Image (cartoon, coloured by chain):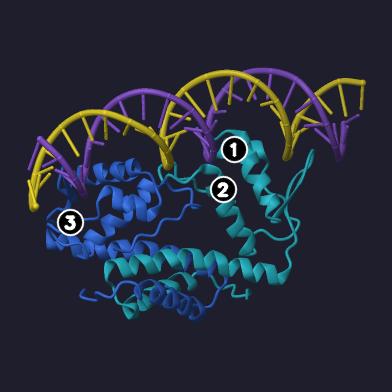
Chain colours: A blue, B cyan, C purple, D yellow
Amino acid sequence: MLLEIDHHSGVPIYRQVIEQIRRQIMAGRLSEGEQLMSVRELAAQLRVNPMTISKAYALLEVEGLVERRRGIGLFAAKLRKDKKAQTRAQLLEEILRKAAVTAVQLGIPEKKAGEMLARLYRKYDSGTRSHSNE
Amino acid sequence: MLLEIDHHSGVPIYRQVIEQIRRQIMAGRLSEGEQLMSVRELAAQLRVNPMTISKAYALLEVEGLVERRRGIGLFAAKLRKDKKAQTRAQLLEEILRKAAVTAVQLGIPEKKAGEMLARLYRKYDSGTRSHSNE
DNA sequence: ATTACTGTATTAGTTACTTAATACAGCATA
DNA sequence: TATGCTGTATTAAGTAACTAATACAGTAAT
């Protein structure tokens, strides 16, 4: 599971974790009933305190995206398919819009912006290797 | 000067101020020597404590983007063209990285993401018509 | 029962962020 | 000099976020 934490963004870690797990569930990359990394495991990977992860998980459960089972682990909850597809497109468009606005405001040519995106995409995609989606 | 603060984003106010002023300077929207809003004026507009704005301004000066003159005000600094280009690239890369991670996590193919970016770019570029940069 | 995993709670302490009130410092101008 | 702007510093307080250490609680397998 790809999780990127930016320690310098000012955005609380637990929020970053929530956003990204939410995204992965929406993507179907975490399918219904699938087990997520344990609190301690994820905390170790991100080099972060376990209670920070626990907090993120607790809020994800409130949101209805995951189910916590003490003694067993954390599991992705079931989601309606239509909601999933719709939300996915929205999520990506939301951030791509910000990127596009930034590029235009900065006067960076479309071609160069596109090349940068492609390079970054491959960088993060290379660690993934499932490619089952879409 | 338009400055929008999102009090619910989790991003510190002084950081939001920095990001937006930085972007406006890089975009040439604030040209060299131009005076910015005073600490108290901006603080009032954003309904925020003056010292929060002062902190943002202080960090912008460290960054070399503005010059503070006590008793007079705050002014956009002169920038070497190369540094400007470099920083601009960094700013765009930052947000494109987030977009790339999102796309990968959502399982959206590189090609489709690229097309979306291009479409959005053109959408926002068409309303600009300055094209003096780069 | 023991071991080894799960997630949870508590307590305590640190740091970052923000606000508030007050005072100070520098510049310009009437 | 007096006024009215600038930005700055200090002190105090409160909250949010994070960490650390420790202990507890539930499940499963040996």
Q: Which residue is mark 1?
A: B52
Specify the amino acid type for callout 1.
Answer: Thr
Q: Quadrant of the C terminus of chain A?
A: bottom left
Circles 3 and 1, Cβ within 8 Å, touching? The answer is no
Q: Which mark is nearer the camera, 3 or 1?
A: 3
The numbered mark, 1 or 2, whose residue comes first in the sequence reads 2
**Label 3 vs label 1: CA separation?**
43 Å
Q: Position of residue D25 (x, y in %)?
A: 15, 32
**Picture disc at residue B17:** 2
Q: Is residue B113 visible?
A: yes
Specify the amino acid type for callout 2.
Answer: Val
Q: Nearer the viewer, residue D25 or B66?
A: D25
Specify the amino acid type for callout 3.
Answer: Gln
Q: Which mark is nearer the camera, 3 or 2?
A: 3
Q: Nearer the viewer, residue D4 or A133?
A: A133
Q: Which residue is mark 3?
A: A35
**Label 3 vs label 2: CA separation?**
40 Å
Circles 1 and 2, Cβ within 8 Å, touching? The answer is yes
Circles 3 and 2, Cβ within 8 Å, touching? The answer is no
Left or right of B73 in this view: A52: left
Q: Quadrant of the N terminus of chain A?
A: bottom left
Identify the secondary structure beneath mark 1.
helix
Identify the secondary structure beneath mark 3.
loop
Q: Position of residue A45 (x, y in %)?
A: 36, 56
Q: Residue at x 35, y 60 (%)?
A: A3
